[in-house]
Amino acid sequence: MVTLINAERDGTSKEWKNSQNKEVLCMEKYIIFGSPHIEEQDIREVVDSLHSGWLSTGPKVAKFEKMFADYIGASHACALGSCTAGLHLALLVVGVKPGDEIITSPMTFAATANVIEHLGAQPVFIDIERDSMNIDVSQISSKVTKRTKAILPVHFAGRPCDMEAVIELAKKHDLHVIEDAAHCTEGEYRGRKIGTIGDLTAFSFYATKSLSTGEGGMVTTHNEHWAEKIKVLSSHGLSRDAWKRYSSEGNSHYQVVVPGYPYNMMDLQAAIGIHQLLRLSKSLQRRDEIWRMYDEAFEDLPVETPASAETGTVHARHLYTVLVDSENAGRSRDGVRRILYEQKVGSGVHFISLHMHPYYANKYGYAPEDFPNAMYVSERTMSLPLSSKLSDDDVARVIVAVKKALRK
């Protein structure tokens, strides 16, 4: 087994090399694509929940909601079991009904469009900008019809969409704006936090996210009525959640006021996230450092690295996506990923555009070339490990592995 020698930066060649000027790999462990950064204080908070007896929705969920609302600067934050639940309920509370149309991006996880389908509405896809991989706002107006109810922009990889243009279009056509910020907890747009701009915003705390509760999500809004409806809908439609029903504050009966859903977050989940929320700024700083290392290391390789963050925005640095130039690399994106896997370096594909998946292609008759930029990215995209948990040695291993995989 090879022993990893601390890599040193060569200011002339801008390559990672060891002290003997030879590249080496440490094969002792597999570098997971999206490993959560869990620390001892997170574990102690979970143990405290176990000792307290509050395992499901309770005081720590309430604390986490208050902390998140303060962090975002939103009037209300509703903790849920997933970002998917958040998108579903956000669409529901603004009145989306069967037959309505929701304009969104196909370059996203399936949940973004699936929740629209669940409500009997139709996702109307708009192609992406190739550089930003966000929805091409200039194409939205041409797709607005009498049935259009909302615009659902996706802040892809942590890069904020052009929200000024989105809001302007929404006002012009009297549409709601529901943001998919699953990738963008730390994002900012022109001095405003993502989560304070649209009508409602859904965040994800899935295992690979910078703030992870395993599963979990949050919806932020300034609208008190919508927030109250989400609270009721997420707890089976009960008029009082478990914390209010069983704590020392109350002993009254609940009423079923609407057929709701089991979308509540547990205290065990909130406990994992409380201290991570306090470390978000530090976590983003570390991911930004890794991002710059990758940019510098890959600038002469047959890949397109992510575009720079737009002026006046804060990129949340969730995914570091490269586009593999198969012709000059001598192998396909999947071929590159296989070589990375052999070197025990994880990677991901974010995403294969939804219009190229069987369900959406068959139901709506899409061909891959209908959204050419989304197709282009789908065929080439590859996400590399990006976590504040990564050490410099881990980053060095990733860089060496990528260079090996991209050599003809």
Image: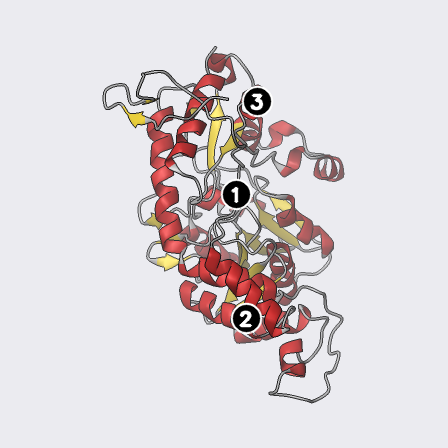
- Where residue 212 sits: x, y (%)? 53, 53
Identify the disc placed on residue 350. Answer: none
Dot 3 lies on which element?
A: helix
Instruction: Give the mark count.
Output: 3
Q: Position of residue 361 (x, y in %)?
A: 71, 35
Q: Tell me if residue 179 comes above or below residue 127 in the rendering.
A: below
Q: What is the CA distance from the residue labelled 2 to the residue labelled 3?
A: 42 Å
Res 270 seen here: no
Relative to 305, is 327 on the left or the right?
right
Label disc, if present, on residue 60 of the rendered structure: 2
Contact check, label 2 and label 3, Cβ < 8 Å: no
Q: Mark 3 = which residue? A: 342
Name the amino acid type tagged 2. Lys
Q: For this rendering, which residue is in front, 231 or 61? A: 61
Residue in view at x 54 percent, y 27 percent: 344
- Which numbered disc flags the more N-terminal residue, 1 or 3? 1
What residue is disc 1 on? 35
Neighbor class of circle 2 (other Cα within 10 Å; few <14, some 14-19, many 20+) is many
Pointer 2 or 3: first along the chain: 2
